[in-house]
Image: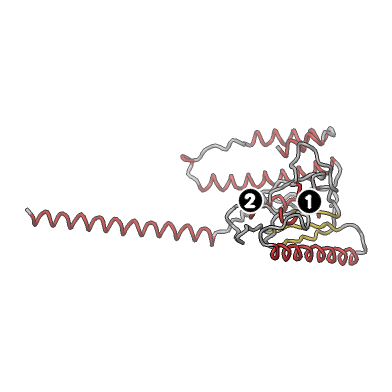
Amino acid sequence: MNYFSHEFTTKIINLKMAFAFLCGILVHMICFVSVSDIYFRSTVVHGIMTNSSSIEAPARRVVFIVCDGLRADNFFEAIGTREGNTPYLRSGFSDNLQIVDRNVKILEDKIEKLYNYDKKTCYIFTADHGMTHSGSHGTGHPNETKVPLVAWGAGIHGPRSANQNELSSPTSWGLSHIGRYDINSIDLAPLLASLIGIPFPANSMGILPHVYLNVTEDQLSEIMLANTHQMLAQYRRKKEIFEREIPSFVLWKFPFNHKEETRLIKMIHSYIQFGKFNKSVSIIVC
């Protein structure tokens, strides 16, 4: 009896070890496939038609300046408004910001002189990411994701007076009288494309931040419509790939179908045709 009990226990242990071994292999295979998919499969979707507006570009060139690890609050604060717990480091940071500011001005002067002050150059200043107080970035904390955006020059609308319906700036910035217009990082791609009149990037998921553009209402409608066509082309292509790769019995219907797409495009064209440009833009933005 003891012999059979010992043999049975041994078999159970062996089965558990074999099961654990197989589970380990399965987990490693899943991890390998996942890592391979991340590193060796491009996120770029091919076969998407590009779109651009037919209007004259507001600018001939764009100077895109990207600062490394600069938070929005530290950038916009007036110099000397906050001492902090480490005044020496704080003063060093302020000095570095002033150096960057002076060099941007020098760069602008040289570029304007190079092109004989034709007033056709647009400047965009931003940062790739922010930074926490401990010096880290990449976790998604607001200090790491909120970066400055300053745009000026050809095709850029000047400062607008602030109103109650807009975001308010902290008092330490000294900009409460000026309108604040925050955007997502992905919205920069269509903004840059629209400024120099090139096709919108095919894989861009950004929505044009139209408040930054200094164009007429009819021109804005045309640019926004081109951005809409680019997004629709991307949607159609990804939908086509999705329907081809996913079995039909587990595939759900997309709520935004061809009929709804056609209806909205016709409505936008109708508003543009009758000069109701603000309504056409409101449909696109919403």
Give, as a three-letter code, the residue at label 1: Ser
Q: Residue 43 at x, y = what percent?
A: 59, 56
Q: Where does the image place residue 37, in percent across and percent down from the top left?
A: 51, 58
**Quadrant in the rendering for residue 235:** top right
**As rendered, which of 88 and 54 lies closer to the eye?**
88
Residue 46 location (% of width, % of height)? 62, 54
Spot occupied by residue 198 in the image (x, y as percentages of width and height):
78, 54
Could you say which quadrant of the image residue 150 lies in? Answer: bottom right
Amino acid type at circle 2 is Pro
Say which of 156 and 145 sits in front.
145
- State the mark number for residue 194: 1
Q: Residue 142, labelled with which disc?
A: 2
User: How far is the residue under mark 1 from the one under mark 2?
Assistant: 28 Å
Residue sitting at x 80%, y 36%: 278
Can residue 176 be spotted in the picture? yes
Quarter placement of the C terminus: top right
User: Callout 1: helix, strand or loop?
Assistant: helix
If you read the primary sequence from the N terminus, does the residue marked by circle 1 or circle 2 appear first? 2
Task: Label 2: state its secondary structure.
Answer: helix
Residue 192 appears in the rendering: no
Question: Would you place residue 87 above or below residue 206 in this image?
Answer: below
Query: Residue at point 56% right, 48% down?
Result: 241
Q: Name the residue rendered at 57%, 38% in the picture.
A: 254
Residue situated in front as seen by the camera: 128 or 91: 91
The label on residue 146 is: none
| Left or right: residue 140 compared with residue 212 | left
